[in-house]
Image: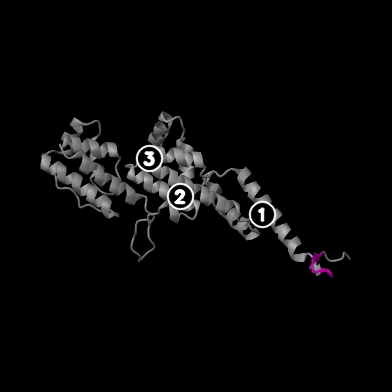
Amino acid sequence: MGRRENPIEADEPALGRLAAWLREQREQAGLTYREIADRTNYHHTTLQRAAKGQRLPSWAVVKAIATACDADLKTARKKWSHAKYWAHVPRAPAGQPRRAPRRLNPDHVESFADLRRVMHEMRRKADWPSLEDLDERAKEAGDRLPPSTMALVLKGEAPLHKPVFTAFMRACRVKEHRIVLWQAAWERTNNARAHVPMTARTYQREFNRAMKNSAHSLPTEILFKLWVAMKTNAAADRRDNTAPPATSGHDGTQQPAPSA
């Protein structure tokens, strides 16, 4: 059976449980990693790394180990999906417990950031299909979800358009009656944003955020447009603040102040 394996040192409990389960299946099958490698298309070192708990293995590797050891694939998928989900949960500040993102329903959505969190949750429930798989599913329905574009959308570096949001939900196998509710949430969020004028301070905040993201290949054209909008809005604010106050006419209506 070879030498004893080193202890699992996983930073995330769900990943540690996956690694422990893979080791347990191998031991119960009485196989070495080299013997499992002979039954799969993977090198024995790749299989060993999957059971170390230091990094999340691909589903293909987990499935290969489970199949070679005659383990239950449904259990394997469940444990891998759980580990995959927690791998996407942001790290908690030092001294604070790590919590899963709060689940949202369509009525509680307040921003596009909420909608993006919902998209991550939908992807988790669909067993984390790759961006390439999502694109293939979208093609079957006559849509497109280019992986490079979706990567930017999910990170908040590209706008979330309604057709993309809808195609994503269908690719994640969301039920149609739920899609209608989420589409309404998108409409409500988009309309609310359209009716809130951006102040100079808001433009400044967006421009600063864009500058920080410029290292991630943010187009120069977007930065320039934000800069122009920020300057234009700031100039409008200065005109409003320096405009002479209006005076009341004899009939009580507001009259513009006389020019100097």
Q: Of marks 3 and 2, which one's residue comes earlier in the chain?
A: 2
In the displayed structure, 236 sits above or below 260; it is above
In the displayed structure, 169 sits above or below 112; it is above
Name the image quarter holding the C terminus.
bottom right
Q: Of marks 2 and 1, which one's residue comes earlier in the chain?
A: 2
Answer few, some or many: residues within 10 Å of disc 2's Cα (few below 14, many 20 plus, some between 14 and 19): many
Disc 3 versus disc 1: nearer the observer: 3
251 is within the stretch colored magenta: yes
Q: Which residue is mark 1?
A: 230
Q: In percent of the image, x 15 and y 38: which residue is there?
A: 32
- How far apart marks 3 and 1 lie (CA) works out to 38 Å
Quarter holding residue 231: bottom right
For residue 55, say whether it is visible.
no
Kindly check if marks 2 and 1 are in contact, taking CB atoms under 8 A apart as contact. Answer: no
Identify the disc placed on residue 115: 2
Give the magenta-colored segment's residue range. Answer: 248-255
Could you say where residue 155 lies in the image, as x and y percent from the top left? 47, 47
Magenta stretch secondary structure, dominant: loop
Identify the disc placed on residue 89: none
Q: Secondary structure at mark 1?
A: helix
Q: Is residue 105 left or right of residue 44?
A: right
The three-letter code of the residue at mark 1 reads: Met
Q: In percent of the image, x 39 and y 40: which residue is there?
A: 176
Q: Is residue 260 left or right of residue 231?
A: right
